[in-house]
Amino acid sequence: MADNRFFSRDEAQAITAKVLGFSRADEARVNLNSTVTGNTRFAQNQVSTSGDTRNGTVTVTSAWGKRVASATTNRFDDESLRQVVETSERLARLVPEDPEYLGELGPQQYAESSGFFESTADLTPEQRARAVAAVTRPAQQRGLVATGFLTFSAGSQTVATKRGLFAYNQSSRVNYTTTVRTQDGTGSGWAGSGHNDWSRLNPEELAERAIRKAELSRNPQAVEPGEWTVVLEPTAAANLIGLMMGSLSARNADEGRSFFSKPGGGNRIGEKFLDSRVTLWSDPSDPNLSSSPFSNQGLPNRRVTWVEDGVLKHLNYDRYWAQQKNVQPTGFPAGYSMRGGTASVEDMIASTERGLLVTRFWYIRAVDPRTILFTGLTRDGTFLIENGRIVSAVKNLRYNESPIFMLNNLETIGQPVAVSASESGDVSNPVVVPALKVRDFTFSSLSDAV
Amino acid sequence: MNRREFLVQGALVTAGLGAFGPEALAAVRPAARVAPGADPAVRELAMRALDAAKLAGATYADVRISRNRNQALSTRERQITGLSDNETYGFGVRVMASGGWGFAASRELSLDEAARVARQAVDQAKANASAQLRPIVLAPVESYPDVTWASPVQVDPFDVSIEDKVALMLAANEAALGVQGARFVNFNMFFLREEKTFASTEGTFTHQTIYRTFPRMSITAVGNDEFQVLQSTDVQPMGLGYEHVRDSRFVENAPRWAETAVKKLTAKPVQPGRYDLVLLPSHLWLTIHESIAHPTELDRIMGFEANYAGTSFIYPVENFLGQFRYGPEIMNVQGERSTRGGLSTVGWDDEGVKPDEYLIVKDGVLNDLQTTREQAPMLAEWYGKTGQPVRSHGNSYAQSWDDVQFQRMPNVNLLPHPERDVSLEELVSDVRDGILIDGDGSFSIDQQRYNSQFGGQVFYEIKNGKVGGMLKDVAYQIRTPEFWNAVDLIGGKSTYFLGGSFFDGKGQPSQSNAVSHGCVPTRHRRINVINTGRSA
């Protein structure tokens, strides 16, 4: 079906066939992406900037033997396509051989993915302005100041090779985040969510959540940094679990430069390294985790269980490392989910004698890759829990902590929900995780930032 | 040939330049020097967009047409792992209509598409204006009807053959691997050339060619169940050409970096506590970036970035400008976009303003803030009181044609000691119990820029005025005002060095800005140092 917003399957087939027709190299792969994106930002209770863009890129990877290079353009007339093929071929002639290049893939079987929604692809500036007003009006009525960002991306991704591989996928993703602050700057509350389907987001509910947190977070009290029991809302939990998901390279582990390296050599697959309630997986076919069923190389992405009952089941083997180790390449679907429990955040608060409730984390940066230790700060809704209830807002704290330690110190696991886990609020991978109650979480200092 | 074909062909002539080898280059080299703004067809496209915007009801409009070319090379040990050459070409139109902003962009460079995109931006502005509470006022700007600017490169990186680049990288890797214990080496190079045309309804038409070059080695030493990484942060990204790579002498320096990585394996874990810190410019630029340059962005201060990048401890501005003591009297911090080789250096910003040099901190006191045309009027009272005109500092930037421009930091520099040329030796000589930090490492700071934590590449003990053995697992935690007021001495002009960030994120959607920070080494008394090592 033709679609004037981005390339349909037929158009993608025609363009990739044309590009491959220009190729003279031993191997060639075409990556064709086309997108429509739109966003609206707001600050001081009114729209600040917005934008709508159409773009597309074609990347050609050419190989002469094991000499490989790629070139990209966003121009699609015949001459530009011919030129981008020639550029990649000329560059490939000039580079030394890449001994790890395995050639391109032939036809593959892919899982179904249903990550495209018209509701998202059709989101107009007028609809976005109404969704903004759903937050700014109630905020203004309560004397608060709302800031936020509504953004979507919809488009198609295509991979085709000279060996006959053709993979096409359509996807869409929308993210809505808002930070509501008090006029005097002593309180700040955040709420956000992301989904493939715009109709699943609820601006009124986001507004209510952010407004409530802003009002509750006024005049935060100082507490002593140190080891705390924490109730991490799902976004905060995802902020940290995602760091471990980014450290799953089998090769780094085998090379001795990863937490997953085994002392004396090899990796820790098969070892129990987390609380036995922890199970983590990726699955491009799960409607809540929909993502591309193939990688940039056209390698199938399928369901992968990374951790099961606390045991490391898989690390990510790329094609080369899989061949070296005589295993199947893993694939690396975008997004992940963690198995939940039955507790609500309220239950976790009620069962806590003294602890902190954390809405989200910010400025998360690696400190020590040996332990996946990161630092960062709480932000936009941090509260003191005493005797089973929230008693006050608290000043933000800096943590120095690892998801490894955190997932070994679990007390209670909540119900999984879809979150917006990227710090930037940009459209990002689907993440569905529960709230967590964790003991001995390490905070190293206080911050005066609100 | 119609206009559309002309545009497409014009693009093609220069599109594949530079990487093809000497013969191809000789044939097309002259075209490489011509920015797209010089092309009458590009001017016509720009004018069509502005006319269509005005016709649709815009009270202000600007258009940016840009072609970004980049090349990324990556190697590990004795092999190449990636080579890509990328180009993106398109235009974006920003308009004000009914009091609201609108922005739309497209990769299709035709006159009809220029008019369509301009109308789309106006429609969007009108949709946004429905909930407008306050009018937007733009500071006055001079018009520059036809001006050009280019980064001062000696060697265009896209003119250097791939063979030369790869040979240099593999030779440097080999030199590093020659050091016992250095197990893995990554060497990446990234080059950018942006050819950008800007036109506005204020009568300005600029075309600029901007270059940036970023070479970086990372060496991993592996010991007994332990690994340590060293990055070549004494070579910083610059707004220069390939001469920056050659001048940095990677092959000659690689063994020294590799030896340092190996030594880190056996460095002594730091004892947590309070120490005097001597911070070298290769490290300090990042602390300046986070704790001075970001909190003095006026859009953050006014709450425009509250949902992501954050706000600032500098609020409300009237309580801070002219009053807040950032640091000692010897501290002067300058904003500018004119330093040769600076990453943010340009002729005109992305709303046609010629950037000026200004003092953000003057004799230790907060003196000015970073602005765009929309923001300068927010400081009208301060400018009136101090006898300065209300004008933008020229700090507007967008990372590409498909992103809207907004306030981004210029090069923000800590100027040398105002009175004498203080040496590094002098800074160290008066330290009894301290740590010297070289190179930028881990960094994290809160959303109002109070509390931050910085690591580094290499740490050395200072005992009784002498630099001693290496330490590891060092990070310092600060609160911005106390940290800068704990400075008692800074380096003189001969210690000045330009560091910088190639990928500074801000905005939603997040955009990347490149910015340099010139600085001298500093000495800070009694700063809190933690040990970041934990056992798993």
Image (spheres, coloured by chain):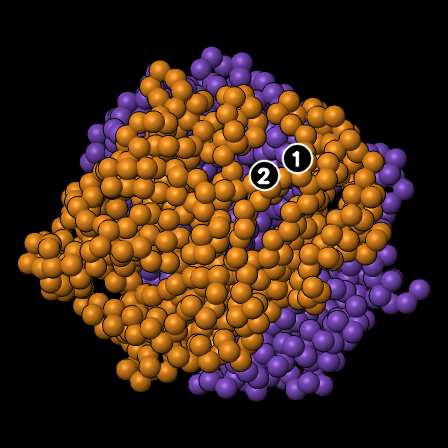
Chain colours: A orange, B purple
Q: Do the residues labelled 2 and 1 touch (CB within 8 Å)?
A: yes
Is disc 2 surrounded by few (<14), some (14 to 19) or many (20+) residues within 10 Å? many
Q: Is residue A36 left or right of residue A440?
A: right
Of residue A39 and residue B513, the one placed in the foreground of this image is: A39
The Cα atoms of the two marked residues, 2 and 1, are separated by 8 Å
Is disc 1 surrounded by few (<14), some (14 to 19) or many (20+) residues within 10 Å? some
Whether residue A356 appears in this view of the structure is yes
The quadrant in which the N terminus of chain A is found is: bottom right
Q: Mark 1 lies on which chain?
A: A
Q: Is mark 2 on a helix, strand or loop?
A: loop
Q: In this view, does B276 lie to the left or right of A90?
A: left
Q: Picture quarter containing residue A98?
A: top right
Q: What element carries label 1?
A: loop
Q: Which chain carries label 2?
A: A
Q: In this view, does A183 lie to the left or right of B380?
A: left
Q: Which residue is drawn at 45% across and 47% down?
A: A283
Q: Could you tell me residue B48's position as x and y percent?
A: 77, 75
Q: Could you tell me residue A323's position as x and y percent?
A: 56, 24
Q: Residue at x 58, y 44 (%)?
A: A110
Note whether B412 is above or below B119 in the view shown: above
Of residue A68 and residue B415, the one placed in the foreground of this image is: A68
The quadrant in which the C terminus of chain A is found is: bottom left
The residue beneath circle 1 is A105
The residue beneath circle 2 is A299
